[in-house]
């Protein structure tokens, strides 16, 4: 199905065409017609399926055809996301798809200018996007209200549970009009019992839609695996990258220490590389993501935890420098390439430390990952640090300021909450 076949308002159709969309992805074809009829939706769809465009196009079409004169301090639509990165990604896609609608968009989350977000929200917005903590913060300060909000979208609902946000999510939903007086859409990588329980509790007989993630992954992504010794992984990675010449690559590792090591050695050998790990400040994180999206940074190294919520179009290659220990992480990792109908390639390096998870991964995705054997020409002799450089690096590390320790007796915040506020 093409977007031109859908009954979209002219302003929305313009945004779709300007964004370069023509054919619908499976989730878009399943969601948009139902949403345009005003039905509530509970859809299983992972990142890369076009789900964000599916709910934004549906939302803008409904808002355009059902204009509200005065929302009295309420946004017309509330979109709740579990992470700052996902909220930011939704915001930018909303600006792109909704550029001809005249709607006002705002994303609120921690780590950026608190007062600026508050002032913009107080002045009034049509579509409010945010993480649970920051949304509740501003709500309790009466910066906005939800009394007349007509549309609710919950993205990555399963991760709301995983990150401990379910109570915050229910708090916000209960401040909205009852489900019979609003349209609600929920998206999740899995429609588990607890996710569907949430849907049936707070939505109006939602239409259940399932797009199987494993099938999509196998169809769109070329997968290959190399067995390699731990100490030969960097020379082999350099050789594979030289052969593949990736335009935009994500490299996944299992630890922060591995991330730092891979970045240092790739940079030394001619690949402009940076890492996103859990300890970097938000401004630097957003800057690195922006550079990666704009093509100024061709290679990004990340851990699974730090990479959650990263959604970048045009990733040509995913490299599993370390095989993940969780089988679902493998699907999430390689799903960063081959998105929205495009092709992509995933290359995995299986060493003696992490190869034990390979059997479970192959069982989970329902296929054997094709194995290629590297000959001697594939291993690139790398440029290594001199002894003097190693000593200087160690001095700099020891001299670097460290985070202050938490005062004794204080109870740590619930996991994920303080980081999102």
Image (spheres, grey):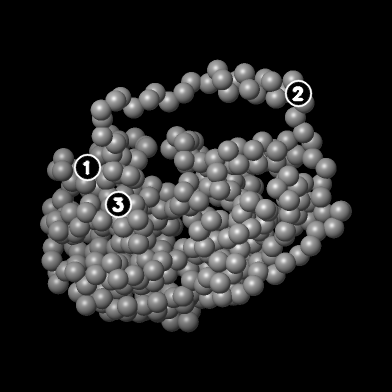
* Residue farthest toward the right in the current orientation of the protein: 377
Spot occupied by residue 134 in the image (x, y as percentages of width and height): 27, 44
Spot occupied by residue 248 in the image (x, y as percentages of width and height): 63, 53
Callout 1: SS: helix
> How many neighbours does mark 1 have within 10 angstroms: few (below 14), some (14-19), or many (20 or more)?
few
> How many neighbours does mark 3 have within 10 angstroms: few (below 14), some (14-19), or many (20 or more)?
some
Reply above or below: 111 against 7.
Answer: above
| Residue at screen point 56% across, 75% down | 366
Quadrant of res 320 = bottom right
**Tag 2 or tag 1, which sits nearer the N-term?**
1
Mark 1 and 2 residues: CB-CB less than 8 Å, in contact? Answer: no
Front residue of 414 and 273: 414
Give the residue pinned by disc 3: 164
Q: Quadrant of the C terminus?
A: top left
Name the mark nearer the viewer: 1 or 2.
Answer: 2
| Residue at screen point 75% across, 39% down | 269
Callout 2: SS: helix
Name the mark nearer the viewer: 3 or 1.
Answer: 3
Alpha carbon distance from label 1 to label 2: 51 Å
**Tag 3 or tag 2, which sits nearer the N-term?**
3
Front residue of 3 and 27: 27
Tag count: 3
**Tag 1 or tag 3, which sits nearer the N-term?**
1
Give the residue pinned by disc 1: 137
Front residue of 290 and 263: 263
Left or right of 14 on screen, residue 257 = right
Give the residue pinned by disc 2: 387
Mark 3 and 1 residues: CB-CB less than 8 Å, in contact? Answer: no
Regarding residue 176, the answer to whether it shows in the image is: yes
Left or right of 197 on screen, residue 400 = right
């Amino acid at each position: 199905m093409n977007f031109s076949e859908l009954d979209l308002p002219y302003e929305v159709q313009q945004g779709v065409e300007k964004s370069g969309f023509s054919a619908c992805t499976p989730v878009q074809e399943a969601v948009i017609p139902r949403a345009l009829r005003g039905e509530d939706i509970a859809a299983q769809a992972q990142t890369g399926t076009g789900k964000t465009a599916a709910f934004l196009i549906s939302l803008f079409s409904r808002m355009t055809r059902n204009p509200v004169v005065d929302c009295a301090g309420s946004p017309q639509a509330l979109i709740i996301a579990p992470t700052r990165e996902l909220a930011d990604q939704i915001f930018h896609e909303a600006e792109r798809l909704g550029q001809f609608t005249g709607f006002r968009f705002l994303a609120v989350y921690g780590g950026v200018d608190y007062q600026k977000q508050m002032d913009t929200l107080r002045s009034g917005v049509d579509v409010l996007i945010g993480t649970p903590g920051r949304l509740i913060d501003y709500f309790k300060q009466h910066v906005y209200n939800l009394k007349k909000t007509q549309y609710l979208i919950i993205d990555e609902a399963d991760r709301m549970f995983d990150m401990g946000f379910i109570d915050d999510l229910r708090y916000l939903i209960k401040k909205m009009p009852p489900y019979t007086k609003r349209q609600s859409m929920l998206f999740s990588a899995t429609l588990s019992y607890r996710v569907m329980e949430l849907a049936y509790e707070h939505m109006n007989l939602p239409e259940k839609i399932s797009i199987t993630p494993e099938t999509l992954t196998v169809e769109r992504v070329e997968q290959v695996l190399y067995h390699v010794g731990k100490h030969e992984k960097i020379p082999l990675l350099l050789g594979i990258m030289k052969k593949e010449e990736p335009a935009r690559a994500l490299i996944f590792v299992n630890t922060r220490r591995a991330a730092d090591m891979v970045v240092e050695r790739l940079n030394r050998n001619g690949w402009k590389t940076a890492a996103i790990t859990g300890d970097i400040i938000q401004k630097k994180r957003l800057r690195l993501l922006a550079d990666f999206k704009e093509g100024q940074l061709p290679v990004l190294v990340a851990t699974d935890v730090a990479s959650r919520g990263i959604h970048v179009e045009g990733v040509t290659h995913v490299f599993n420098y370390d095989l993940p220990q969780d089988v679902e992480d493998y699907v999430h990792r390689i799903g960063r390439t081959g998105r929205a109908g495009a092709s992509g390639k995933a290359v995995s390096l299986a060493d003696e430390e992490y190869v034990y998870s390979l059997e479970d991964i192959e069982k989970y995705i329902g296929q054997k990952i094709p194995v290629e054997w590297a000959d001697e020409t594939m291993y690139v002799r790398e440029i290594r640090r001199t002894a003097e450089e190693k000593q200087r690096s160690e001095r700099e590390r020891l001299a670097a300021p460290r985070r202050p320790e938490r005062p004794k007796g204080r109870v740590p915040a619930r996991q994920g909450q303080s980081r999102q506020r």
